[in-house]
Amino acid sequence: MFRQQRAFEIKRLQSGGIITNYYCTSACGHCLYYCSPSWKKEYMDRNILQLILQKVKKLGCHSVHIGGGEPFLNLDGLEMVVEVARSLSINVEYVETNSSWFKGRESALEILFALREKGLSTLLISMSPFHNEHVPFYKVKGVIEACKEAQINIFPWISQFYPEIDGFDDRTTHGISAYESRYGENYLARIPSRYWIHFGGRALKTFAKVYDTKYYGDIISVSRGGCSELLDVSHFHIDLFGNYIPGLCSGLAIGYEDLGESLAREEYPFLTTLYQDGIEGFLHLAKSDYGFKPSREYLSKCDLCFDIRYYLTMEVGVDSKELQPRGYYENS
């Protein structure tokens, strides 16, 4: 069986973000982290944030973005995160928001002025049909206007959807079916060609409805070799529990304290198997050691990997530092 020759080690960090919370007002169909209102209302702690940012800086990354969940659901916590980053000379590139917190101009300005004083310069404002299923568009418009008044830069993600969303009543929400009725029945299937979506988390379920799935053996046959993407540090995330998510593979975790060190197979058996032997090796391990049996067709090797990990966590009851946070599986 093919095995990567290099040690499994995250030596440097290039660009990434801090997940302050998984709790969210929305449960978007493309969400990589299965964020939703069902999560516990937990938020990033000051002490662990300092340790995480010190590690990030040590490994060569001097700027981060802040995301969730919805970071604005704990305003004191968000102010703390921005303030701590600035105190450590780490630039906050932007804070992500779905705008659900918007209640009116005056309260929005008060919030934004306070954050600007702490060091916030830019808001990434989410706008997509997935978000509009949960957040009325008038809230997005309101945050945009408030940012202009507060002199906070706007990073609209993604602006090409603006006219389509604005074609509906902005005081209420609209499901994907409404977009398909107005803009074509293949609307959902076309979305990934229009902007970047990582096919993990809830996106696997969403797009399995419109894309072809495959027999697991066929997926294995075209997925030979180790999962080298686990080493990708071009857009990393570390969450409020101190979990570094390797290669944006949500539900997999490396303790932030282990970054920069070679990961031993004894401590990280699932991740090292995936890195060295790929999905074929991980499937073999799950079958031989835990009795896993593929039970359906899959969208991709990532879909198969998630099914294995869900089985290990929720059905077998494996308690592993690699399969974290547990809430990811509980809320999937």
Image (tube, grey):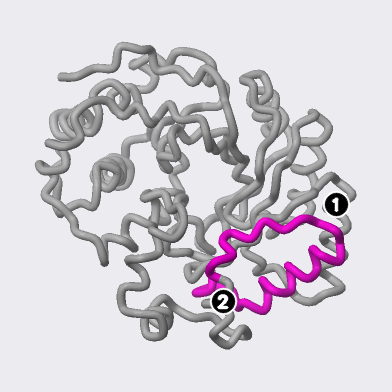
Q: Main secondary structure of the magenta part?
A: helix
Image quarter in which the N terminus is found: top left
Label for residue 163?
2
Q: Check disc 2 and give the amino acid type.
A: Pro
Query: Tag 1 or tag 2, which sits nearer the N-term?
Result: 1
From the viewer's perspective, is 205 left or right of 86?
left
Image quarter in which the C terminus is found: bottom left
Q: In the image, what residue occupies the spot 70% across and 24% down?
A: 54
Dot 1 corresponds to which residue? Answer: 116
Q: In the image, what residue occupies the spot 59% across and 51% down?
A: 68
**Marks 2 and 1, Cα distance to the nearest angstrom?**
29 Å
From the viewer's perspective, is 138 left or right of 127?
right
In the figure, 167 relative to 92: above or below? below
Q: In the image shown, does 151 or 194 lie closer to the viewer?
A: 194
How packed mark 2 is, by other alpha carbons closer than 10 Å (few <14, some 14-19, many 20 or more), is: few
- Residue 315 appears in the figure: no
| Residue stretch rendered in magenta on the structure | 132-161
Q: In the image, what residue occupies the spot 46% across and 57% down?
A: 195
> Which is in the foreground here, disc 2 or disc 1?
2
Q: Position of residue 100 (x, y in %)?
A: 65, 69
Q: Position of residue 194 (x, y in %)?
A: 44, 60
From the viewer's perspective, is 55 left or right of 324?
right
Q: In the image, what residue occupies the spot 84% across and 70% down?
A: 107
- Residue 282 appears in the figure: yes
Q: Check disc 1 and give the amino acid type.
A: Arg
| Figure quadrant of residue 242 | top right
